[in-house]
């Protein structure tokens, strides 16, 4: 029997980078210096990207269809990157869709893992939307999440379910709460945090950009390459270092919109002047108030990383693009 | 159109007391001194109790059947007490059953409320099982719940869903995390915390009892009459005093098993000698380590109450029975 890695949401921004990084290797570390070879990467999304590599098998479909979700978890699946999800604005606009994809789709995948009886590794992307407003003045590994959007509530519910399934030996969960992942291409996917990317991409391209938050808004961001690194690192950790609580707050660049503008100005003089602020109070409250008193202690101790700072993050984008 | 109160889990220990208290009144306070008359109490459980009162309509059925759950929420339902649930030991023994009743059953009821478009009040019993092991050394209104049993995980997921549905205006949620409710009759319902009741009921009846926790185990308990009072109080509060976070840690009698024995001895000399301890480490860890550094600040400010102490709680049982 082969060894398959399943990646859902493979056509997404983070998913594409995870797949790309997986294709750059033949073996996955599994902790304590050991590695396992894999021979297939099963990628899925509503429409799957064309990737010319014999290890890729693409299966397009809707993760909200429980039969489809279950069909993905074949007995040779040893590792799942479950990245598919309906993002913040879309989950807010359509409660049924958000629940069907974010909660029920995740549960269907997990129940398919249960049928395997092999305790597969299950890497899941949660979100800092697990913290709602008022955003906590200090955030550490014990800070309670009181989500204030359906997206965050659904992610938090999945975190709880993954901890419980992990405890029961059904799967071996690893959940990363992602900050704003940048720099996304301009295609809107319904994320209310899209401005995190717009504010970097557009001024560097010489375009004006209107931000829904103020200069003082504090954001948590991470480059997509760091996000992919961290997801693969999560998959590679030995179970015994993770303990019972499988959700980790990832480290992030904590930066104000004004500091982003200053950094852009250093890279490309004149770009900061292209940024205008038209504050939308709901967006400012939910996305612009992340604290700098942030202590992702467990994730740092487990070797997760973030960009060295806003300058490094922008340099990475300038060098490598989206 | 009439005004109906729906009570699920009506044959349960807490449910019976809620129904009894409702039957003792004709109107429900709805906050700010206002009251609303009700003309029907729709009770449901797998088997419904026989109650000779023209206001009672009994509909037996399985809340895990989504069609049945939805059928209960008729347009005249203005208030729901959703007390039905699969308790700790049973939810641990049967994951599917726990998820079907505790999560999916609750969601089906909530989705039926959504179809009403009337924002009905929705009172839900969660549990201190939302706190898992290691039990926190201090518990206040911001203490994160990391459940360590499927029961607690399922309850915490419902709390998140109820907050989200409340925020969206689908229903008006009020969630109480109940401590151990005593003094239950001896019929086992699969609750691992059954010893909370056994340790009081059996010695007072002159019977020996074996507890799965040590003398030093610290428990959180409440009389069933206080629990019913609090649930009705929750239903009666005006929405504007509750804010966005609809889950409340109820005050409780925090007492060690040894202190319970001392209190029993005062009421009935010789009864403490009937208590033996055969510690089950898993039960001791999950149920015997509740902190006395407990600050249910919001619930106290909102007028929720608990028994005055272990003596008062035992007196209540001696006077009124189960």
Image (cartoon, coloured by chain):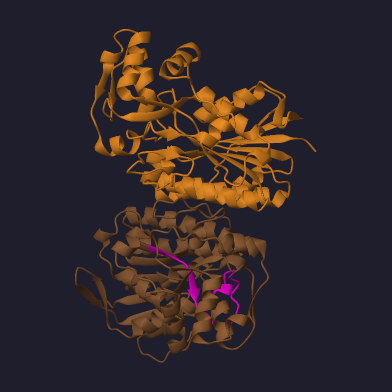
Chain colours: A brown, B orange
Residue lying at the far left of the rendered structure = A33
The residue at 61%/27% (across/down) is: B19
The residue at 52%/67% (across/down) is: A219
Q: Is residue A191 one of those drawn in magenta?
A: yes
Q: Is residue B302 above or below residue A58?
A: above
Q: Position of residue B83 (x, y in %)?
A: 54, 37
Q: Position of residue A262 (x, y in %)?
A: 52, 77
Q: Is residue A20 above or below residue A88?
A: below
The residue at 54%/26% (across/down) is: B305
Q: Nearer the viewer, residue A300 or B244?
A: A300
In the visual, does A24 lie left or right of B15?
Answer: left
Q: Is residue B41 one of those drawn in magenta?
A: no
Q: Quadrant of residue A140?
A: bottom left
- Residue B48, can we see it? no
- Residue B199, can we see it? yes
Q: Position of residue A23 (x, y in %)?
A: 35, 85
Q: Position of residue A115 (x, y in %)?
A: 36, 62
The residue at 73%/50% (across/down) is: B117
Residue lying at the far top of the rendered structure = B269
Q: Quadrant of residue B240?
A: top right
Q: Nearer the viewer, residue B78 or A254?
A: A254
Q: Which residues are magenta?
A: A175-196
């Amino acid at each position: 029997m082969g060894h398959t890695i399943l990646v859902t949401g493979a056509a997404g921004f983070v998913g594409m980078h995870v797949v790309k990084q997986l294709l750059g290797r033949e073996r996955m570390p599994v902790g304590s210096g050991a590695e396992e070879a894999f021979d297939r990467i099963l990628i899925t999304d509503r429409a799957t990207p064309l990737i010319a590599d014999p290890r890729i098998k693409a299966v397009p479909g809707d993760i909200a269809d429980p039969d489809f979700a279950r069909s993905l978890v074949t007995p040779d699946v040893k590792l799942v990157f479950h990245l598919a999800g309906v993002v913040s604005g879309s989950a807010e606009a359509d409660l049924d869709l958000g629940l069907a994809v974010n909660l029920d789709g995740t549960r269907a995948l997990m129940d398919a893992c249960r049928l395997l009886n092999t305790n597969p590794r299950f890497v899941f992307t949660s979100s800092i939307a697990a913290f709602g407003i008022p955003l906590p003045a200090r955030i550490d590994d014990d800070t309670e999440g009181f989500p204030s959007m359906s997206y965050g509530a659904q992610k938090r519910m999945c975190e709880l379910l993954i901890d419980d399934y992990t405890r029961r030996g059904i799967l071996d969960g690893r959940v990363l709460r992602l900050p704003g992942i940048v720099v996304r291409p301009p295609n809107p996917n319904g994320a209310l945090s899209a401005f995190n990317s717009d504010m970097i991409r557009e001024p560097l391209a010489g375009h004006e950009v209107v931000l829904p938050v103020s200069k003082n808004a504090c954001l948590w961001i991470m480059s997509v390459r760091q996000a992919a690194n961290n997801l693969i690192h999560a998959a590679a950790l030995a179970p015994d270092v993770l303990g019972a609580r499988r959700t980790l707050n990832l480290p992030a660049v904590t930066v104000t919109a004004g500091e982003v503008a200053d950094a852009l100005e250093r890279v490309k003089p004149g770009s900061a002047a292209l940024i205008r602020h038209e504050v939308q109070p709901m967006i400012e409250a939910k996305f612009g108030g992340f604290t700098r008193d942030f202590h992702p202690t467990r994730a740092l101790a487990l070797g997760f990383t973030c960009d060295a700072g806003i300058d490094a993050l922008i340099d990475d984008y300038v060098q490598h693009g989206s």
